[in-house]
Every structure is written in C-alpha cells, then in structure tokens.
Image (spheres, grey):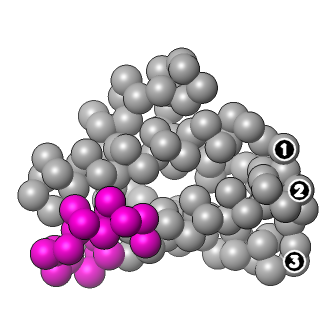
C-alpha cells in the first residue's frame, strides 16, 4: 500500500474502502511495472483484466465521491479532463501501458484524489 494512503486510512475499518485502496495500489503497480519493463507478460494481462473487471463491478460506489477530488488535478501539467482511474482503465489491455507516459502522468492525480477523499470524508 502507498505509505501515505496507509497513514490516512490507518484507523479505518471500512472493508469496501480497503478493497478500493488495494485495487488502486495494484493498478498503480501494474502500470508502473509494464511501463518500466516495456513488456506486458501473460500474468500482467490477466491481472489487468481482473482489475478492470473488479472496477467495472465496484467503482460505481466510488466514482461520484472521488469526482470533486480529481477535478483540477494535473496530469503532465494539464488539468485532467476525466476521472484518472477511468482513464487508466480505458486501456483494452496491459500492453497499452508500454511506453505510455500519459498513463504514468495520470497516476498521481488518481492517488491524490483517493487520498483527498479519505481526508475529507473522514473515511
């Protein structure tokens, strides 16, 4: 888990929040790994497919809550135009993250939105 997110959520007992954080962490790690290694293994592709499926099934309960916290965030020095998590999940496969600097630039906006929501909601 991201150290700062771990700090912010240390006293939280919300299992759904813990799952969201775990899936965000896994997505972030996968994007970085595929970008850095310049390859997407079969395991990476399966992990990404599993992550996309989880977000498709569960993100509806978080999207509107996070919206005010990603609006105005920057990706590559430009305000993000859409939910940065959904931006990352729009890729059809993990292979799409190879050399994808824009995806890497959306990771901080996604993390900042999650952390800011945790702080502002008392979650």
Residue named by callout 3:
42
Task: Assign a secondary structure to mark 2.
Answer: loop
Q: Earlier in the sequence, mark 1 or mark 2?
A: 2
Instruction: Please determine whether, in this image, residue 22 is positioned above or below residue 94.
Output: below
Task: Assign a secondary structure to mark 3.
Answer: helix
The residue carrying pointer 1 sits among few (fewer than 14), some (14 to 19) or many (20 or more) residues within 10 Å by Cα, namely some
Given residues 23 and 53, the one toward you in this image is 23
- Magenta segment range? 1-18
Residue 5 within the magenta-colored segment of the rendering: yes
Q: Is residue 27 left or right of residue 116?
A: right
Farthest left residue? 122
The residue carrying pointer 3 sits among few (fewer than 14), some (14 to 19) or many (20 or more) residues within 10 Å by Cα, namely few
Residue that appears at 17% across and 51% down = 119
Residue 64 within the magenta-colored segment of the rendering: no
Res 38 label: 2
Which mark is in front, 3 or 1? 1
Which mark is in front, 2 or 3? 2
Marks 2 and 3, Cα distance to the nearest angstrom? 13 Å
Whether residue 95 is visible: no
Residue 94 position in % (x across, y down)? 78, 60
Residue named by callout 1:
99
Mark 1 in CB contact with mark 2 (< 8 angstroms): yes
Residue that appears at 38% across and 56% down = 60
Q: Is residue 114 left or right of residue 32?
A: left
The quarter of the displayed image where residue 36 is located:
bottom right
């Amino acid at each position: 888990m991201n150290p700062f997110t771990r700090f912010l959520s240390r006293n939280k007992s919300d299992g759904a929040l813990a799952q969201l954080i775990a899936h965000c962490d896994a997505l972030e790690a996968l994007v970085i790994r595929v970008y850095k290694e310049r390859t997407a293994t079969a395991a990476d592709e399966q992990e990404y497919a599993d992550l996309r499926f989880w977000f498709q099934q569960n993100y509806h309960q978080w999207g509107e809550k996070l919206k005010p916290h990603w609006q105005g965030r920057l990706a590559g020095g430009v305000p993000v135009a859409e939910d940065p998590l959904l931006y990352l999940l729009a890729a059809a496969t993990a292979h799409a993250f190879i050399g994808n600097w824009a995806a890497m630039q959306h990771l901080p906006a996604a993390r900042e939105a999650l952390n800011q929501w945790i702080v502002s909601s008392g979650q």
